[in-house]
Amino acid sequence: MKKRIGSYPRVRVEGGGRGVVSQAGAVLLVETARKAGLDREVSTALAPWRHTRAVHDPGKILLDVALAVALGGDCLADVGMLRAEPGVFGPVASDPTVLRLIGTLAAAGPKALSAIRAARASARERVWKLAGTAAPDAARQVIVDLDGVLVLAHSEKQDATATWKKTFGHHPLMAFVDHGSGGSGEPVVGLLRPGNAGSNTAAGHITTAQLALAQLPKKYRRGRRTLIRTDSGGGTHEFVAWLAQRGRWLSYLVGMTITEQIHQAVLKVPATAWTAATEPGGEIRDGAWVADLSGDCLKGWPKGMRLIVRKERPHPGAQLRITDADGLRLTCFATNTTAMPIAALELRHRQRARAEDRIRAARTTGLRNLPLHDTAQNQIWLEIVQLALDLLAWMPMLALTGETRRWEPRRLRFRLLSAAQIATTARRRYLRFARHWPWTDVITDALARLEALPNPG
């Protein structure tokens, strides 16, 4: 190192060094895929699309692209960062081979999508068992959040149209399993739709819910232990009736649009019927109250449905709507849960906002842009994005503790996954992380926890 000049030291730069591994922290994701059995599952699922004399396994190719996306890549060519490190990622297919596979899977249509989704569902069930008390079903209930995402297109792509926000692109519906306040969340559905697809289309919500349930362990595919949450886009008669259908018996918390009928019902609620809203810690939420609605506004909805309204002082600068009352902002949701206090139900529905955090994480993990032209190819890309997000959710669930479990993908990349360290090889290969790196202990402890997990049978 040369003498310091200015704010930074001058460092001599030389090419051709040996033993340096970029993205060394990605071994956490590789080990997670191995312990989850995801590599085996995807390889087996895509075996029908492997040519007789093919050098590369289609499952390995797809998982390599997912790893590249998890590390921050946003197109198929970014798999090159893995190809440059064969000591960590093994042999990686060339860009033309990757593109041919995407085209082949896109041409296979629903068969390929079903195979990929089945592999993810099988690995998910194993991960939840390995996670124990850290699993999202540890409280014996699974919460699935449905929400739409606007993905902008900057060129002409199939099904890219004007959106309801006057932008141009696509409008996929996503579903995420909520990990609660102690974790992040994992994707279970990414349903690609044209940009002009409606926000409250019942058919789209039903299809998304069906695909989401298929990703859960079998015992959660029906019954009250599975809770479906949506914003007001899911507040349609058809979707709520589907959720409450006899034999399905799902729990739901669905946002509702404030109609004139609901507005009039709110005005008739006596002051003594309002209950103070609460915060996650149990303290009273200042300036917010909740109440049950009854009467004509429940006619035509499934039996047992409750309509709950919240009134709250608007934030400074917020403009009131015509459906608000007495200077207070009104929001409303429907539920079929009866065994919880009304304030707890309202808090649970408000926590649906965590889905926005999952969407933000997805945007930084390949969903900022759909890189291909055809819709079928971009649907495969959406499955790759979900594989990447799965790994970024499963690794903290299995290997991290405390605050680090809540780190979003961007922070995971900066602190854990992008660490470039020295690899020493004798008869065995070792990956040594620098002592001065602030999060080396987090990486090594996480690897130790992953190594202690049983291998797939």
Image (cartoon, rainbow, N blue to C red):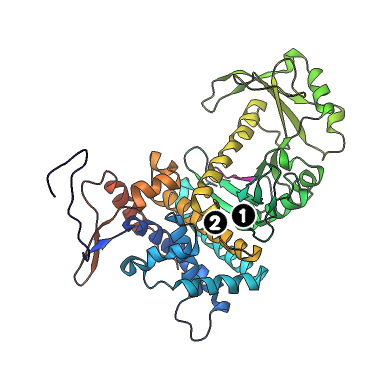
Residue 273 % position (x, y):
74, 17
Q: Position of residue 192 (x, y in %)?
A: 65, 56
Q: Position of residue 287 (x, y in %)?
A: 62, 17
> Residue 386 bears which disc, if any?
2
Specify the label residue 259 is tagged with: none
Count up the numbered dots. Answer: 2
Give the farthest residue toward the left.
3
Q: Decide which of 117, 134 is in the foreground and name it.
A: 117
Q: Is residue 369 left or right of residue 23?
A: right
Structural distance between the alpha carbons of marks 1 and 2: 8 Å
Determine if residue 70 is in view: yes
Q: Position of residue 395 (x, y in %)?
A: 42, 53
Under circle 2, the secondary element is helix
Q: Amino acid at mark 2?
A: Gln
Residue 16 magenta-highlighted:
no
**Numbered range of the magenta stretch:** 139-146
What residue lies at 75% left-to-right and 25% top-to-bottom? 292
The residue wearing badge 1 is 189
Question: Residue at position x 59%, y 19% from top?
Answer: 316
